[in-house]
Structure formats: C-alpha cells, structure tokens
C-alpha cells in the first residue's frame, strides 16, 4: 500500500543506522589488525620472534590494539559530542549565516516562502534557514536529529542562479530527507568518518615530524630513529586512509539510494519534474562544490549535489551522475534542457565523458516517470506526503494571512503573543484580561495588548483552520527562546488553559505540540522499545478512549466506537472498557510510550484513531487537529486538512 512507503522508509533508516555501526566496527577491526601488523614488523627480532597471532595475544600486541581502538573511538566520540547541537551546530560548522525570518532580501524571502509552503503542506514545522554567503556553487542540505530541530542550509549560488521552480525542486528534495529520517543518519556518518580519519591524521603528523627531524638531526643514530618514526607514520597514514576509502564507499552506497528516492519525492511534492531537473542541470554546468569550508568532503553525503572534488568519483561519489538523475526523473528531459540553452552555452556536457543516459537503468527508474498522484486514502496514507490539494491549500492560506500578522510570527515577542492569542481568542474581552492577568510578569513573556490586538481580529476572521499553520510558522522564532524562557512559556500556556477549568481538544493539542517541540527532548532520537501492541495496551486504551469520546455524538456510541478502535490491538476482556476521563498528563504519557513502537506498527494506531473521528461521516477542524496531534507525537508528519 502507498502509505507503507513512509513507515517502511522510517524503519529502513533505523536499520541503516545499525548497519553503519556494524560496518564501523568491522572497519575498526581491520584498521586495528593493520596497525598491529606494522607494530609486529617493527618490534620483531631474530632472537624474540613470535608468530603474528601469538604476538597479538602478547602484552605488546594487546596494548597496541587497545591504543588503536581507543584512538578511533575517541575520535568518533569527540565529533559525536561536537555535533550534539544537531542541525544548528552543523550549520555553524560550515560557516553558514542564519536567514532572519523577516529578511528584506528578495532571494531570501523567496526561499522562505517556498519552505513555508512546503512545511504547511507536509505538516512539518518550519525549519530554520541558513545561507552560505561565500559559496557560488549550487548546493543545499538539511541537518538535525529530528524534524523538530532541523535546519536547511543553501548556498548563495542556489539563491541567485535558480528560478523559483528550480529552488522549489531543491527544497522538495531536502524535505524528503527530513520526512524519511535521513538527517540523523547523515550526521552520524560525519562522526563515524572522523574516528576512522583520526588514525590517518596521526600518521601524517608522525610522517612530517619524522622526516623533518631526520634532515635536521646531527647524528646518524638520531637520523635513523627519526626516519623509522617517519616510516611508521607513513604506514599509519596508509592504513588510516584505507579506512577512509572504505568509509567513503559506505557513505556513497548509503547516500546514492537515498538521493534517488529524494529526487522522486521532490517530483511528487512539487508536481513539476522540470523544477528539480533544471536545478540538477545547472549543477552540471556551474558545479556545486563547497570551496570555502574544510568540511566539504565530510558533508558530501548530505548535500543536494557533490560538494567535494575527489578521485575515483565514479566509485566514491555520494550521488549518481547528474545526467542519470535527470534521466531518472523523466526520460528525454536532459535533451530538452540542453536544447533550451544550446544557443547560450558553448558546452553542455554534464557528464564529462562519464555515463550515457541509458546508464540510469541501474537505478531502476529509467523509462518511467515518477508518480505525482495523490497517495492512497486514509489518515496514515497522508503521512509523510505532500498532495496537490495540500500544497494548493498552503499557498492559499499564506496568501490570506495579513502581512502584519505574518511578520509578527517571525519575532520572539510576536510568536509568544500568538500562543496566548490562540488560547483566548474565543473568550469575551473581560475574560481575556482575567486570564492574561494570571501570567507572571516578564520582559519578553508578559502579555502585550498591542500585539494581541493585531492577532485576535485575524484569528476571528480567518477561522479555526489557521491555528496550527500559524503556530508552525512561529516555531523558528519560538526555538530562539532560551531554556528558561521556554519553561516560562509552558507555564503561561498551562495557566491560560486552566483559566476556565476545562480543557478543549485544541488546548490539549496545542499544549502537547509545544511540549513536543520546545523541550530538550525534542532534539533526541526516540529509541524503539516495543515491537508488539501487547506491551503498550494501557497507552492504547487511554488514546482510543479519548478518540472515541471525541468522535461519538451520543454517549452510548462511545463504548461501541472504542471497541471498534481497539479491535485491531486486543479482543474481548483484553480491550477493557472505555475510560470516562483522560487527563492531559495521561495522554502525553500514552503518546510518549506509543512513540517508542516500531515505525511499522504506527500506521494502525493512526488509522484506528482516524476511524473514531470519521465515525459520523465528517471531520471538523478540531477533530483533525487532534489527529495531527496524535501523528505529530508519533513522529509522523500529517498534512493539513484542506478546506
């Protein structure tokens, strides 16, 4: 079924991470054996000669092996900890500048508009945007451990050389990496390669030091000693870079498949094959190499196109050849793109003699166009997709939002006041004032009536459908709050929710959304702890009780609806009876547990919850917001419900 694609790719991403660890351990073992062999040859003598396998078990062999393993693991661990800051740390590592949400630059505004449209249409929070100002090549990447803290980085060349359609194709490609869980794998690859590379770096240092000192040494004995040191360094350098070679092979093998999938997803998201094909064509003409950062080779597997020049590119390249990617998008597209620029470009040879278009047959996509059809019906079927209706809805919604309203969302103060406005806009003025009076005074977080009065009329006129999209647009600004300010915001939100001593479905959804995306846990990867429903039955009972009560129009229907929803997970007495009350705390605990299920078990939960809200044959905005809450808490981005 179509909807299995997203969940299967999530499961595959987790398996790829495990595979990388296994391959990393294999590389460590091989490199350790290589270094031990060098140590064995250096220390071996005629009087104390041992067979290599006996030497390995000796004190010298064990110490050598332990030292090598420690160095490699330490190198990876240091880089792993360095990248604990997630996407923001990676962006800073390559010297990218964050694009201000309220930027006045036309090219940067174009990028932000495209990203916001794609975010709303896919149900993903808007990523923070960065630009590499000094890079004239055409390239982009996303980084982060979770979609909630993702950043998107583009080069200045991508902003200036690409048309809006081409830039949209690139953004769609990068959103695929966000949705499919590729970012986490990409960041971990950087750390793994760093450990393997460390041994080669130590060898290079020893090589330079040994031969430099041997030339300046005054005695022949010292000179020989330094020469031996240099030779050992040379051996370590060779062994280290053999490890890097195989690391690049792993990097390329994992990345090529995912890049092909991301190209296909971009066509599905944008419904415009010429957009991404045109961007790839321009990369073939102008290049996408990152020349201003020393991390270009480390980032190669993360980028839209090749970011580093390397030898044996046909073997070590992280991306299929450009012409193969274009041909896979649509056969004949490359010839059309060449003919358009034939009069203005002297040479249009993208491949530099490598690979004819028919080579794309190896990818399995040649001869077929990517589907742009709407995915299979059903709530889980919409997860991780962008449909025509969803994108049209996002474009129309953004066009309807007043510019003043939208500009305020890009500031910290405006984003905070939006949270308050969303919770009080249905109350009479005097009750609004009473609720706001409960919030503790704070320079940034205190209620500001001048800003609230700009939000409230728009929320009334635009209707309930604008609530979650507006909150998603405000997320980049909310993420700029420091930890203490985030805690205070959570407290203020709880105070406003409790002001009338009742909790609506929207208040429940909004509170959970903010907690999910603005706490330290939001950047942490949720491990898989459960691989069957039996282990999480109490959490399922809690969630389905709430969904059944929300979907039933008559009290007696709720019990039957609950049993229908639970039928796929338990039967008879195991399913239990409907819970008469579900608190916010209980719901959050239940969703936290359910998020630790294997990705392949989550579609049934989303569809069972969807069965409850569609029980009466229609889905109103509040019910759909509840569905989006469930999906969001399960790390399953769900597009909005088109009006």
Image: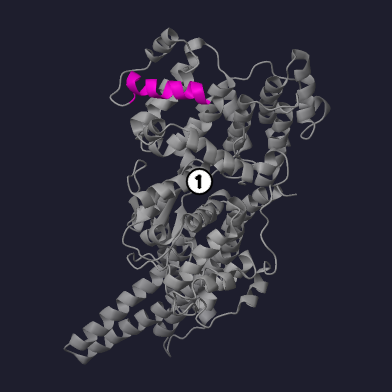
Q: Is residue 303 visible?
A: yes
Q: Which residues are magenta?
A: 445-462
Q: Does residue 96 sit above or below 424 in this rendering?
A: below
Q: Position of residue 520 (x, y in %)?
A: 44, 38
For mark 1, what is the residue? 146
Which residue is most to the left?
218
Which residue is most to the right?
572
- At horizontal 69% and vertical 30% (from top left) the residue drawn is 540
Quick check: is 283 in the magenta stretch? no
**Picture quadrant of residue 241:** bottom left
Left or right of 494 on screen, residue 333:
right
Q: Does residue 202 sit above or below 379 in this rendering?
A: below
**Picture quadrant of residue 69:** bottom left
Q: Residues within 10 Å of mark 1 (few under 14, many from 20)?
A: many
Which quarter of the rendered picture does the C terminus lie within? top right
Decide which of 123, 518 is in the foreground and name it: 123
Q: Secondary structure at mark 1?
A: loop
Left or right of 291 on screen, residue 141:
right
- What secondary structure characterizes most of the magenta part? helix
Q: Is residue 519 visible?
A: no
- Label count reads 1
């Amino acid at each position: 079924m179509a909807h299995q694609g997203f969940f299967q790719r999530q499961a595959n991403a987790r398996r790829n991470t495990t595979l990388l660890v296994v391959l990393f351990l294999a590389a460590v073992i091989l490199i350790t054996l290589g270094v031990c062999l060098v140590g064995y040859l250096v220390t071996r003598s005629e009087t104390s000669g041992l067979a290599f396998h006996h030497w390995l078990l000796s004190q010298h062999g064990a110490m050598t092996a332990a030292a090598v393993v420690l160095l490699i693991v330490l190198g990876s661990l240091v880089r792993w900890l360095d990248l604990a800051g997630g996407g923001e740390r990676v962006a800073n590592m390559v010297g990218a500048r964050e694009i201000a949400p309220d930027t006045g630059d036309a090219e940067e505004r174009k990028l932000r508009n495209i990203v916001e449209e794609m975010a709303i249409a896919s149900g993903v929070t808007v990523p923070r945007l960065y630009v590499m100002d000094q890079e004239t090549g055409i390239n982009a990447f996303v980084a982060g451990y979770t979609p909630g803290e993702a950043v998107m980085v583009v080069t200045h060349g991508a902003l200036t050389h690409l048309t809006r359609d081409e830039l949209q194709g690139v953004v769609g490609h990068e959103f695929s990496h966000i949705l499919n869980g590729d970012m986490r794998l990409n960041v971990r690859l950087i750390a793994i390669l760093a450990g393997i590379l460390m041994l080669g770096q130590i060898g290079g240092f020893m090589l330079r030091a040994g031969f430099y000192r041997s030339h300046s040494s005054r005695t022949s004995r010292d000179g020989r000693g330094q020469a031996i040191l240099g030779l050992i360094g040379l051996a370590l350098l060779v062994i280290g870079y053999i490890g890097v070679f195989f690391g690049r092979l792993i990097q390329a093998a994992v990345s090529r498949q995912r890049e092909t999938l991301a190209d296909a997803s971009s066509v599905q998201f944008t419904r415009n094959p010429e957009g991404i094909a045109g961007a790839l064509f321009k990369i073939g003409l102008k290049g996408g190499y990152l020349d201003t950062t020393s991390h270009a080779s480390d980032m190669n597997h993360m980028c839209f196109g090749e970011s580093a020049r390397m030898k044996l590119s046909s073997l070590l390249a992280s991306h299929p050849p450009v012409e193969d990617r274009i041909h896979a998008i649509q056969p004949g597209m490359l010839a059309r793109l060449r003919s358009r620029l034939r009069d203005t470009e002297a040479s249009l040879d993208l491949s530099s003699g490598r690979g004819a278009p028919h080579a794309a047959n190896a990818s399995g996509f040649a001869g077929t166009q990517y589907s742009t059809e709407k995915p299979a019906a059903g709530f889980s079927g919409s997860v991780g997709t962008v449909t025509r209706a969803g994108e049209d809805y996002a474009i129309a919604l953004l066009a309807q939002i007043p510019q003043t309203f939208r500009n305020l969302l890009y500031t910290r103060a405006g984003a905070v006041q939006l949270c308050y406005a969303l919770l009080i806009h249905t109350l009479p003025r005097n009750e609004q004032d009473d609720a706001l009076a409960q919030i503790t005074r704070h320079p940034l977080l205190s209620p500001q009536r001048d800003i609230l009065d700009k939000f409230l009329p728009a929320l009334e006129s635009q209707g309930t459908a604008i609530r979650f999209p507006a909150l998603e647009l405000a997320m980049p600004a909310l993420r700029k709050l420091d930890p203490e300010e985030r805690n205070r915001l959570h407290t203020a939100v709880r105070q406003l929710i409790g002001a009338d001593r009742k909790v609506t479905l929207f208040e429940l959804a909004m509170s959970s959304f903010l907690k999910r995306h603005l706490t330290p846990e939001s950047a942490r990867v949720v491990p898989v702890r459960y691989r069957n429903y039996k282990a999480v039955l109490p959490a399922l009972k809690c969630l389905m009780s709430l969904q059944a009560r929300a979907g039933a129009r008559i009290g007696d229907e709720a019990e039957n609806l609950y049993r229908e929803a639970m039928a796929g997970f338990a039967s008879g007495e195991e399913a239990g009876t409907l819970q008469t009350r579900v608190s916010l705390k209980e719901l959050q605990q239940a969703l936290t547990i359910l998020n630790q299920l294997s990705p392949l078990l989550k579609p049934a939960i989303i569809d069972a919850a969807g069965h409850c809200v569609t029980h009466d044959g229609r889905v109103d905005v509040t019910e759909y917001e509840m569905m989006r809450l469930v999906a969001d808490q399960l790390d399953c981005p769900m597009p909005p419900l088109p009006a």
